[in-house]
Amino acid sequence: MEEHFRAIIEAIGENPDREGLLRTPYRAARALEFLTQGYEQDLDEIVNGAVFESSNDEMVIVKDIELYSLCEHHLLPFIGKAHVAYLPAGRVIGLSKIPRIVDMYARRLQIQENLTQQIGQSIQRVTGAHGVGVVIEAQHLCAMMRGVQKQGSSMITSMMLGRFRDDPRTRQEFLDLIRTGR
């Protein structure tokens, strides 16, 4: 990967041998490896058995999960927050596992729409919940730094499964709770 970053630096008309750029191909390769580490991760390894029996049948929400991803169309970052909820059906997942699942999928070349679906489907698969809701709000540097150059724009996507899709009251409760935090 370092050779390719060196070639890119040359292609834009820069000198990869000047002092400030000497180690840039190495650093850029390591950074890209980190930003795409989700390809090396597996859902079952992330969860690591942290699903527990529980009689709780009320909504569980983890909100404001920071996420950083790379747009698969331009390789530019999109940055935002994920809000994830589920209705337990006899099992709950360890609290830290939900942000880890978000990170696993975010750390891939991605579009926000697919990221939202992958998180929802994974939480559903792991927990067997009565329903899962995911909302992601993100700002895309491909729309801010280039293209339309709209600094204040953000994108919101949602994925509703089970009762979150079928029951408007459940969906509304989730949306109200992530807006107010109460």
Image (cartoon, rainbow, N blue to C red):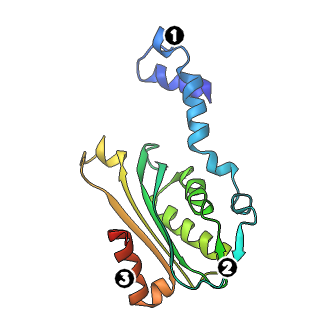
In which quadrant will I find the C terminus? Answer: bottom left
Which residue occupies 63% across, 45% down?
A: 37
Residue 146 visible (yes or no): no
Amino acid at the residue labelled 2:
Arg
Which residue occupies 47% across, 43% down?
A: 75
Mark found first going from the N terminus, 1 or 3:
1
Could you give the CA–CA distance between mark 1 and mark 2, rounded to whole angstroms?
Answer: 57 Å
Give above or below for 117 relative to 14: below
Q: Secondary structure at mark 3?
A: helix
Residue that label 3 marks: 172
Mark found first going from the N terminus, 1 or 2:
1
Quadrant in which residue 30 is drawn: top right
Residue 18 at x, y = what percent?
47, 9
Give above or below for 54 relative to 178: below
Residue 118 at x, y = what percent?
56, 66
Mark found first going from the N terminus, 3 or 2:
2
Residue 143 at x, y = what percent?
31, 48
Residue that label 1 marks: 17
Give above or below for 127 relative to 96: below
Residue 45 at x, y = what percent?
74, 58
Residues marked 1 and 2 touching at CB (< 8 Å): no
Residues marked 3 and 2 touching at CB (< 8 Å): no
Q: Nearer the viewer, residue 78 or 178?
A: 178
Residue that label 2 marks: 91
